Amino acid sequence: MTTRSTSYRPIPRWSSDLEESDFDLDHTAEASTLARPSRFPAWFRTRRSVTLWPYHQRRHINLRWLLVAPIAFLCIIIISIPLLNPSYTYKPKSYTGKNPLNERVFIVAAIVDAELIRGAWGEAVLELIAAVGNENAFVSIYNNDSGPETSMALSDKAVVSEHLPLEGLIQPELSQSQEKVRRIPYLAEVRNRAMRPFYTSERYFDKVLFLNDVVFSGRDAADLLFATGTREPASRTTYHAACAVDFINPFKFYDTFATRDSNGYGMGLPFFPWFSGKDGGHSRKQVMKESDAVPVRSCWGGMVAFEARWFEPGASDEFKEDMQSPSSPVDLSASVRLMSEADGPVRFRGEEELFREASECCLIHADIDARARLLNISKSSDSDLETIAGSNIVMNPFIRVAYTRSSFRWLGLTRRFERLYALPHLWASWLVGLPFGNLRQFQEAGENVDNLVWRMRDQSKDSLTGTGIHETSVTDAYDGCYQMVSQKARPGGFCGVRQLSVLKAERRPGEKMWKSLPAPPLNSLCGSQQP
């Protein structure tokens, strides 16, 4: 019988029968099988058939994902937010660009640039008049020594044109310098003179609208006047004052000097959402919620609407009658008495102390706020009736203006990306220490307070004098010291900054008309108060 040949090796019966060469051969074959990519699907492969990727290849893949994933996520955010959740792009349905209740508006401005009046500014004013209604709009434009070109450009509008003498605004304490006129009292006087036709007019007005030399939309201005804070068309507004938001370029907020948040703090860095998160950051939160009535202590924004009654000579009489009516829910006789002590219309003003400045645009809101708090009134959101509450001064970020036409054209696009700035703004504002401190921020009008006041030395008497416009022999504003003075706080402590702003005696074309002088250091105390 012939023995059959086999093509395989018999399996060893004992471990001692294994040869070293056999083990090495089998191990090499197994490693080769595992290193090769499998041709079978994942559900079919056994544990021995799983593909093994070398470690250095897996490390490169992880590093690549660590770099690509955040970039991809950031790109998705940058693309989706402007498209799906843009900032202040879609106005409420109550914004119609019209005057639904036929309210009468006194429009007031102080303009110097004739080209602006002939161009974008003048066109927007005409659009605003059409939205308000010719019979409901009165325009007062103050023209102070701006030349014949401006007067000709304003020939078809109501114009207050005159020379404003500066002699009455000279600060004698600044006699050593050529710059003797403080900037804020000068600007306050210009605005008060622009309001003169309001005081002499026999017509009744519901609103007063102040306009800076800005590029704006007439329909936007109408919405600021008649729709801020409303929810339904033809609803009556409830604000005491409402401001637009002004931009010096497509991204940068401009009027930080006049704007204070609901806690009285100054601004964060001047890009969206503008306000800091200090003490809860209520104003900032309302901006992020896309409110059209962001609560603030003061603002201006290049364009601001007021209730006209604050500027009327008999404003307090109207409040007294309302509060003393039989339907009044509380006894406000104390508020009426306090109001009688400060009767008359509010006026623009500046600070009296030297080396302390506050924008006249901030102080006018502070005065309105103080009156509203004295009277303890504010309009309810549902009707015209007064209710017990605080004052109502708001900023409307839907309404935006700019100081150049090119910047104004970009505002519709740049606002879509604003929500991307929220976290960088919060971190950057904290990093640079904004908002800055203010020793008088929380002082309320009428409180007894102790303040450091700069007293200058009268060289003729070798004594310290107060401040104000008076005859004195003082020749150097910095020759003095800080003295602790007990006084009653005036409205607007939150507005102030430690500096002195003066009009330049001479300036070149294109330069600002004013400059700021730093205040002396706070450790310059008078002798009796030195530590």
Image: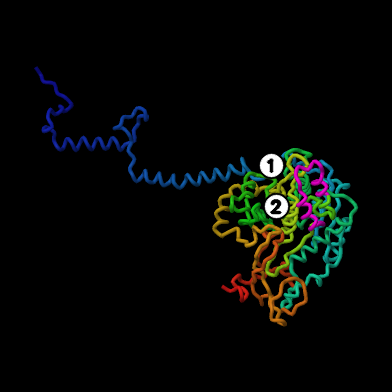
Residue at point 68%, 73% (across, down): 455
Who comes first in sequence, dot 2 or dot 1? Answer: 1
- As drawn, the label of residue 90 is 1
Q: Position of residue 392 (x, y in %)?
A: 72, 49
Q: Position of residue 525 (x, y in %)?
A: 61, 73
Within 10 angstroms of label 1, few (less than 14), some, or many (20 or more) residues? Answer: few
Whether residue 191 is situated above or below residue 290 in the rendered picture = below
Camera-nearest residue between 356 and 112: 356
According to the picture, the residue beneath numbered tag 2 turns out to be: 245
Q: Is residue 505 left or right of residue 72?
A: right
Q: Which portion, as a residue range, is magenta?
A: 318-345
Camera-nearest residue between 84 and 98: 98
Q: Amino acid at mark 2?
A: Val
- Helix, strand or loop at label 2? It is strand
Disc 2 to disc 1, C-alpha distance: 16 Å
Q: Position of residue 49 (x, y in %)?
A: 31, 32
